[in-house]
Amino acid sequence: MNNDIDMGTIQNINSLTDKKDVVIWEYGEKVGFRFAFVFFLLLIIPLDGSWYGKLFAPDSLYDFLATIAGGSREGWIDIDSESGRWGFASYASWWLTALIAALVTAIWTILARNSRYTNYKVLYYWLRVVVRYRIALGLIAFGFIKFFPMQMPFPSLANLNTDFGEYAPFKLYWQIVGVSYRYEIFLGFLEIAAGTLLFFRPTIAIGAIINAGVLFNIGHANIAYDGGVHVYSSYFVLLSLFLLIQYIPDIWKLFIKGEVVNPDYYVPKFTQKWAQFSYIGVKSLLIFLFVFVYGYYRYDRFYNEGRLKEPVNPGLAKAAGHYNVTRFVLNGDTLAYSPKDSVRWHEAFFERYSTFVYKVNKPNDINLGNGTPALNDVLKTYEFTGRAGGKSYLYYEIDSSANSLYLLDKNQKFSKDLRTLLDKKLDVGLKALYGKATGDSLHILKWRYERPNPNVIRLSGVDINSDTLDVTLEKIDETYLTGKEWYMKNTLFTY
């Protein structure tokens, strides 16, 4: 074997456009390309009209970049079933796209039966460019939400004390990754790096191999755990495999058969200076915007803005922990503990941030969302999505001068207008709203708190049912095998 043959040989583009010989494609190659051309363009070009609204009227440069990088996940058809959301029926749009592509291919083939074109190498090259950049931009955006670990946060105290069987499969998987946050950061780095490799022709093959492997792992894990992003992950696997088709014969010859490889891949030659500068300028601008500018925006949203899936407002000082309910008085009657009681609290939690959780023996609606990041802590639902167990989650704000907590139920349904209004700042301003019409519509509660000693908290006030409460909580001394929670370090708050 020639010692000069290496991975770079596969993507050697020197003198590729100097070939004098005309390349003649077989009939099957032409038909296959026509199908691939239509199929992949239909998968890549957004079909959702609202996507274009966000593209042409963005709120900020970040929103513009995020819209381009995220593309549109809307397909031709949505099947309203469990399999349509989590199973293989959710791939229905792919099959419909393939059917449309087959019909267009048939028409194209009939119309081109007398065509003098011997190949589609120019169209094939530019189709590969579109596919490459779709993967690159999508994977870089996908990677940053893991590199700055916001996609799957470390489990909260209440979640660490949730029975295994009360988790939906997807939340169980996300909690496992959240515990292994170093793995999440590495996975994000890998996605960013592999996506970046696709910007450069010499590294397309290795980038496509990495992307196909990483995204296949994510895709089948989401199928196994009902994660909901299996179609989006599989989408990048499919696109990466398409890029690899060109290289597979030469890879086989070089690494399996040990033969000398002389690649002959078409690459357009830009002979005019303006075309060369335009090519270099556009590519450099895209890399700068989506690797560095978009990366900074993601960093800023994580560390400076607190626009995350988990709350960031600090909770009651030195109160974070798991509590036994040692005394529970309802409307003047002291209720003894019973595991079947649907009224008396069984246990309670103060998170490090401003969330208070208590558990009773009654079913609650299960939120099957993935906890979309938000600015306002009330709208951050990740901590209670995907799990049962009778836990109620209350957001609270502290009036330390009056030893009072103002609270509201996080699982209530907020209108679209109210969500938009709330998500303009981190907190709500519950004290100012309490007793007013807006506060009444939000069902804001006011409880007094006392701290007889560092491990005991006493709460008193009126609950959502207008019953009076007087509850004593005693902190449980616990050490978790998951280790100390990895607290987010940011410029807003310290815990």
Image (cartoon, rainbow, N blue to C red):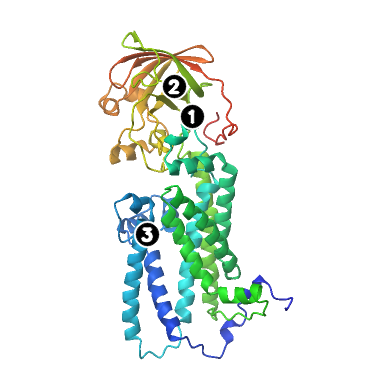
Mark drawn on residue 347? 2
Tell me where residue 135 appears, x and y as whole percent: 49, 62
Q: Alpha carbon of mark 3 to alpha carbon of mark 1: how far?
A: 36 Å
Above or below 359: residue 378 = below
Comparing 407 with 241, the one in front is 241
Residue 11 appears in the rendering: no
Amino acid found under the numbered disc labelled 2: Glu
Q: Find residue 421 and report its image quarter.
A: top left
Query: In the image, is 120 to the left or to the right of 277?
Result: left
Q: Are marks 3 and 1 in contact (CB under 8 Å)?
A: no
Residue at left 64%, top 73%? 256
Q: Alpha carbon of mark 3 to alpha carbon of mark 2: how far?
A: 43 Å
Q: Are marks 1 and 2 in contact (CB under 8 Å)?
A: yes
Amino acid found under the numbered disc labelled 1: Asn
At label 2, counting other C-alpha atoms closer than 10 Å, the crowd grade (few under 14, some 14-19, many 20 or more) is: some
Q: Find residue 368 and report its image quarter.
A: top left
Residue at left 52%, top 50%? 144
Above or below 445: residue 378 = below
Among all residues in the image, which is located at the extreme left? 437
**Residue indicated by mark 1:** 161
Label whose residue precedes the other's in the sequence (3 or 2): 3
Above or below 21: residue 121 = above
Residue at left 56%, top 33%? 485
Element at label 2: strand
**Residue indicated by mark 3:** 91
Comparing 328 with 54, the one in front is 328
Q: Find residue 361 and report its image quarter.
A: top left
